[in-house]
Image (cartoon, rainbow, N blue to C red):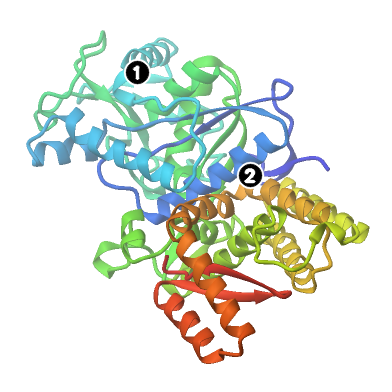
Amino acid sequence: MAIEYYNTLTRKKEKFVPIKKDKVSFYACGPTVYAPAHIGNFRTFVFEDLLHRHLTYQGFNVELIMNITDVDDKTIKASIEQKVSLKDYTQKYSSIFLNDLEKLNIKKATNYPYATEHIQPMIDLVEVLLEKKFAYIGEDKSVYFSIRKFADYGKFANIDISSLKPGARVNNDSYTKDNVSDFVLWKAYDEADGNVFWQTSFGKGRPGWHLECSAMSMQYLGKTIDIHAGGVDLIFPHHQNEIAQSECSTNQKFCNYWLHSEHLKVDGAKMSKSLGNFYTLDDIINKGYNVNSLRLFLLSAHYRQSLNFTFVGLDSMEKTLNGLVETYRTLKLMITNQFNSQTKLNEVSDDSSFEKLCLSNLNGFINSLDDDLNTPQAFSYLFLLEKEINKGISSNSLSINNLRTAKDTLEKMDSILQVIIPTFNEREKTIDKLSSFANSMIEKRKLAKQEGNYQLADSIRKELLEKGIILEDVGGNTIWKLTSNN
């Protein structure tokens, strides 16, 4: 099945064909590091990771560049207010961001370029635009891009600029569709910027936010790239401005495929500190949730559909994740014969229909992702497979080969989802510490039941439960697992 993605540029799904065979150039807008990223930001970053991992699974060599914006209106203002250098201020939050990416199992980008370390390419880009008359120096000594000089300005963001007043300009890095104006490329020095400035042939100052991504994208990936991704809030003005300044400077198409994820709402409303519904990753962790439950939640809806975050929904997703992890753990235990088992699994015949079912669900899972990253449909194949695996385990009808196929299939699916295996590995660290104790108690319970001392057997189960260990009798075997709080 061909890979198809919805292209914001053309507003339709298109077959994905990279510029170079088997290689994908991918630029993702990273954070502005003036504060910790919130879970709405991470919906976008998890979506981009899904895209990255899907392409990798399908055999592409992906070169991903994700910028770190460490100079803009917000970072300068905050660093001055806190009386620290811009570098020290932004380094704190960039470190938090990179750590959060790791917590969420987000695959590392090829490079994370910092804006302040790429000023010269930005200056070069401004000089080209000035020379070609697409840019001009305003009365305030800042350099602006003349949007009327770019015939397709507004097309990408579906904006009509016919009513634009001549000479209208906007100097802020962030603004809305209500401010369709010539945008700033280079901001002239202002005393409010403190000691943040660079000297250039067109004046002392600093780059505008939109300029940064074009310069870094072209430096690392070339004049035309395969994929550019971000949240829908970046379509205008940021991505529209990137297209304008990039294509006017090179006279080439900037990007072939644009993918954008929809907003994350919280309790049906826009996330806001004033509403008390603003959450960072640490907020979620400190409430006792497994961070992989949040990742699974963020993947549960199609990336182009708005997603409403609630803690009830996160609770449900945590239970779902626990079920998947326990299914995977049971498979591993049975394959390595770590049950206190009287059944010889290697005497069970292979079930060819089960092998076909695993392959069918894996193909359905991948084909769903090939179809514009349709995660809800992909999840349906994952959960059907989980159900059939558990049915086979309960009836003890699966051979060693069947169990291995089931495990391998789950691992292939999770190489993209990245929720089951990471959670399993985390819990195994805890399980290792409890293993000897739990197994000895299971043996005591087994002996008590053989002797008819069911009161003692029940008290052992209760004691283990108080320590966060659940016993399950499956197909004549007893296994143990941790409660969801562990």
- Residue 70 at x, y percent in the picture: 28, 31
As rendered, which of 485 and 430 lies closer to the eye?
A: 430
Name the N-terminal-most of marks 2 and 1: 1
What's the residue type where badge 1 is placed?
Answer: His
Instruction: Choose top left, top right, bottom left or bottom right for residue 165.
Output: top left
364 shown above or below 198: below
User: Tag on residue 190?
Assistant: none
Neighbours of disc 2 within 10 Å: few (<14), some (14-19), many (20+): some
Dot in front, 2 or 1: 2
Asked if one can make out residue 372 in the rendered structure from this viewpoint, the answer is no
What's the residue type where badge 2 is placed?
Answer: Ser
As rendered, which of 291 and 215 lies closer to the eye?
A: 291
- Residue 142 at x, y percent in the picture: 25, 24
User: Tag on residue 118?
Assistant: 1
| Direction from residue 458 to residue 142 in the image, left or right | left
For the point 26% across and 46% down, the residue is: 35
Asked if one can make out residue 470 in the rendered structure from this viewpoint, the answer is yes
| Direction from residue 407 to residue 109 in the image, left or right | left
Helix, strand or loop under label 2: helix
The quarter in which the C terminus is drawn is bottom left
Helix, strand or loop under label 1: loop
| Direction from residue 188 to residue 374 in the image, left or right | right
The quarter in which the N terminus is drawn is top right
336 shown above or below 471: above
For the point 37% across and 16% down, the residue is: 126
Q: Tell me the distance, in whole angstroms, between the alpha carbons under discs 2 and 1.
A: 34 Å
Question: Where does label 2 land, which residue?
Answer: 415
127 shown above or below 284: above
